[in-house]
Image (spheres, rainbow, N blue to C red):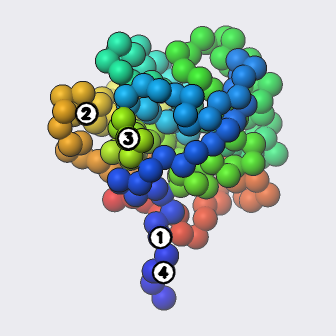
Amino acid sequence: MVSMSQPFTLPIGAKAPDFRLPATDGNSYSLADFQSPILVISFTCNHCPYVTGSDENTRKIAEDYADKGVEVVAINSNSANTYEADDFPHMVQRMDEYGFPWTYLHDESQEVAMAYGALRTPHFFVFDAKRELVYTGRAIDTPRDHTQSSTTELRDALEDLISGHSVQVPITNPIGCNVKWDGKDAHWMPAEACDLV
């Protein structure tokens, strides 16, 4: 039977779900705390090779677009019961070690990942000034080794937005490990979750 329910992943045009989450800097943040005209929310973690293989590419994007009204926020929703390396102390350690140019939030309850429909790590969601979703998917096509990438989907989306145009390719499949849902097998995904395109 074909499900008639809403898609698992937030659809293009949807409003960004609100949240209040603790960050590695000792503060808690809600959606309203991020005021930049363009907001990139990245669902990520500490251990995934697709994350660690592309974090420097994400850093470069955050740095290149910071003065163009773009802010990057990272959210770790992975269960520490599945991978201890994804717990909050390791998040703090990772930020201390690498000094990434984004706020790193902890979604321990996984409610935010469910609200956004995060599929993989990393999975990017780009919102415009009205906090409506204009892009969801990957940043590049080879996140395990960003130096080998031949596509730049996240940059392309940001360039479209900054130029005042609609995002030409608003949906791509994120490439990475699936989100580690608490109490589930490490490879489990919700039944309604599927590839985006």
Residue found 75% across the figure and 48% down from its top: 109
Q: Position of residue 41 (x, y in %)?
A: 49, 36
Verify CB contact (< 8 Å) between mark 4 and mark 1.
no
**Residue that numbered label 1 is attached to:** 6
Residue at image mark 4: 3
Location of mark 3 (residue): 130
Asked if residue 31 is positioned above or below residue 37 in the image, the reply reads below
**Three-letter code for the amino acid on which mark 2 is drawn:** Leu
Q: Amino acid at mark 3?
A: Lys
Q: CA distance from mark 3 to mark 2?
A: 12 Å
Image location of residue 155, percent across then percent down:
30, 29
Q: Nearer the viewer, mark 2 or mark 4?
A: 2
Question: N-terminal of the two: label 4 or label 3?
Answer: 4
| Amino acid, disc 1 | Gln
CB of mark 1 within 8 Å of CB of mark 2? no
Identify the residue position indicated by label 2 in the image: 161
